[in-house]
């Protein structure tokens, strides 16, 4: 586990203790805190194919893929909702897809030569239906009270990526081919109301893969909405890793390794009016799952280092609550979420996530419990700033206070700030809230005029968002100054030399200042040659006076859009 690069974000000290010793890092999401307990079980597998969650008996079933040889036996590991392994079902040949009947009484298992049905109470084998040989790993889904499964028969394992997959079912105690088929891996995901979704993995024989929604209520499946994603130039093709259907059946979410998380309307598979925010930079989508209560969405990814591998967030894409972010890194928790590696409990109280290492030969089951309660948060006392007179190009501190209900967070809260001025709205980043609730937003305004600062707390799965707080600051020009060093006396023959320094605060001048020089004597006032300030701010004026007596030299700079004007004078008595 690596916690050095990205801080953990927990909302209660008790949760810090719960996470101690696990391989989980909860990463810092923008303007949010995370609170979740996590249990981890090391799976007895070197490969993985499927996950099914039995909410009636509170059991989790996981299948070891083990494809590639007819000598490979199969395993199904059975866990409790607390992460304790209670049984392992062994089969003669490799097993792959898993699916539960609607009443959770039967677990359907795709084996190399058969489709098994197990009693979920006793784990006893109920039936074994001989089906077409599969060498690449089946997908299994249940719709209309019967199982649907894929079959791929190849001569070599290397052909699995492109070989034809058939969609089959079991009818009258025997297998039945539905007639639906296509090249490469076909992913199946069950949905409500006797529907299921089938999606095609990207492969060299399918440059523009599809996603289709099927009605499985009849004797044979009927395809409804279908969609391919590539444009006329072949860009934007689907690179499918996982499918999820919302509990109400209205939405379909896709884990697309190229595009991230796609959210579609299940009625016609058009893009939802509002989609989910992009995954963190460097994260590639691998899995997606809606919680059974419809409140949350989990988005799994493959990422390295401190980049989050899992985001848990509101399922409503219009909800701006910042997600819970998890970094899986190291020998205690894996390095990324496995494709097709997530399912929720029906009540949304637990997320079951399978992670794997970079080599893909070790696997872990994480049982994550998002918080069920959200607490309030609010800004109090308004915003103040210092210095009292803000200056363009100089540091400005905007201060405020955020109060939050519930347990004290183990890690500091964060607020987000923006500045809006004549140049538009500028993101200033996130800023830490101290233990007493105070925070300081640091900025350097670069335009003269009014600047409105807005501070936000977007909330998280523990805290509700706070109403934004704003303040308007008048930003003035930065001061400049001129200092002169002149002799008390000069002469008409040797002249007068004056040195000086020009200083400008705030934003650096785009080029060296050019100063105006005037001379006033008993004959009147005249303008001398201008002088350019050196890089270090110094300058020198040399003059041959035209008459005796007091001569006053005035040096001035007119100012610019961001800096005030300045001037200085020096009087020299001139002798013959």
Image: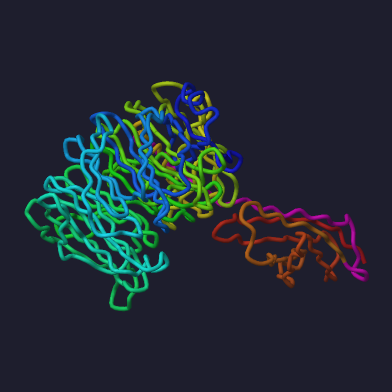
Residue farthest to the bottom, as pictured: 233
Image spot of residue 559 (x, y percent): 60, 60
Image spot of residue 350 (x, y percent): 34, 33
Q: In which quadrant of the rendered image does the N terminus lie?
A: top right
Q: Residue at x 26, y 34 (%)?
A: 124
Q: In which quadrant of the rendered image does the C terminus lie?
A: bottom right
Q: How many marks?
A: 0
The quarter of the displayed image where residue 36 is located: top left
The quarter of the displayed image where residue 31 is located: top left
Residue 142 seen in the figure: yes
Colouring used for the render: rainbow
Q: Is residue 299 left or right of residue 494?
A: left
Q: Is residue 311 left or right of residue 197?
A: right
Residue 459 seen in the figure: no
User: What range is drawn magenta here?
Assistant: 467-495
Image spot of residue 470 (x, y percent): 40, 39
Q: Is residue 405 left or right of residue 531?
A: left
Between 550 and 196, the one nearer to me in the picture: 196
Magenta: main secondary structure:
strand
Q: Residue at x 45, y 39 (%)?
A: 43
Above or below — where is 31 with respect to 13? below
Q: Is residue 561 left or right of residue 106?
A: right
Above or below — where is 167 with respect to 464? below
The quarter of the displayed image where residue 386 is located: top right
Q: Residue at x 68, y 56 (%)?
A: 567
Instruction: Check residue 484 for magenta coloring.
Output: yes
Instruction: Check residue 475 for magenta coloring.
Output: yes
Between 30 and 424, the one nearer to me in the picture: 30
Image spot of residue 213 (x, y percent): 17, 57
């Amino acid at each position: 586990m690596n916690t050095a690069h990205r801080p953990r974000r927990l909302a209660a000290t008790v949760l810090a203790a719960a996470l101690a010793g696990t391989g989980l890092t909860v990463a810092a999401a923008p303007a949010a805190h995370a609170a979740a307990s996590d249990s981890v079980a090391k799976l007895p597998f070197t490969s993985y194919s499927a996950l099914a969650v039995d909410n009636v008996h509170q059991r989790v079933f996981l299948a070891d893929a083990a494809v590639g040889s007819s000598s490979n036996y199969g395993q199904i590991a059975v866990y409790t909702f607390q992460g304790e392994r209670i049984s392992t079902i062994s089969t003669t040949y490799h097993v792959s897809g898993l699916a539960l009947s609607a009443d959770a009484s039967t677990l359907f298992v795709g084996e190399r030569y058969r489709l098994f049905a197990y009693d979920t109470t006793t784990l006893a084998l109920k039936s074994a239906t001989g089906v077409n040989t599969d060498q690449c790993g089946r997908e299994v889904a249940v719709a209309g009270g019967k199982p649907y499964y894929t079959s791929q028969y190849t001569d070599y394992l290397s052909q699995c990526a492109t070989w034809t997959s058939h969609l089959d079912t079991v009818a009258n105690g025997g297998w039945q081919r539905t007639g639906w088929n296509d090249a490469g891996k076909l992913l199946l995901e069950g949905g409500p109301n006797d529907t299921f979704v089938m999606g095609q993995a990207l492969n060299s024989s399918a440059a523009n893969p599809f996603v289709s929604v099927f009605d499985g209520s009849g004797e044979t499946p009927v395809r409804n909405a279908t969609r391919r994603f590539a444009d006329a130039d072949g860009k934007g093709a689907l690179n499918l890793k996982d499918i999820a259907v919302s509990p109400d059946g209205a939405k379909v979410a896709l884990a697309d390794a190229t595009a991230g998380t796609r959210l579609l309307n299940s009625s016609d598979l058009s893009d939802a009016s509002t989609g989910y925010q992009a995954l963190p930079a460097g994260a590639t989508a691998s899995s997606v799952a809606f919680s059974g209560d419809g409140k949350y969405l989990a988005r799994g990814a493959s990422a390295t280092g401190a980049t989050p591998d899992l985001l848990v967030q509101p399922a409503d894409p219009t909800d701006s609550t910042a997600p819970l972010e998890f970094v899986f890194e190291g020998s205690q928790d894996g390095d990324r979420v496995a494709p097709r590696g997530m399912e929720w409990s029906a009540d949304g109280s637990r997320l079951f996530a399978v992670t794997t290492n970079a080599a893909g030969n070790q696997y872990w089951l994480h049982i994550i419990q998002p918080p069920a309660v959200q607490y309030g948060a609010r800004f109090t006392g308004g915003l103040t700033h210092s210095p009292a007179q803000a200056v363009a190009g100089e540091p400005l501190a905007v201060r405020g206070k955020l109060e939050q209900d519930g347990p004290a967070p183990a890690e500091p809260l964060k607020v987000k700030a923006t500045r809006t001025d004549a140049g538009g709205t500028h993101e200033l980043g996130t800023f830490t809230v101290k233990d007493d609730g105070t925070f300081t937003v640091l900025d350097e305004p670069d335009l003269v005029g009014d600047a409105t600062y807005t501070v936000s707390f977007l909330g998280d799965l523990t805290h509700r968002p706070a109403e934004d707080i704003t303040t308007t600051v008048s930003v003035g020009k930065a001061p400049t100054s001129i200092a002169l060093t002149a002799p008390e006396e000069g002469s008409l023959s040797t002249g007068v030399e004056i040195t000086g320094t020009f200083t400008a605060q705030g934003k650096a001048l785009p080029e060296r200042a050019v100063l105006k020089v005037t001379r006033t004597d008993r004959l009147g006032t005249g303008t001398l040659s201008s002088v350019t300030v050196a890089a270090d701010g110094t300058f020198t004026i040399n003059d041959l006076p035209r008459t005796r007596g007091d001569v006053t030299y005035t040096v001035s700079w007119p100012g610019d859009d961001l800096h005030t004007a300045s001037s200085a004078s020096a009087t020299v008595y001139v002798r013959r």
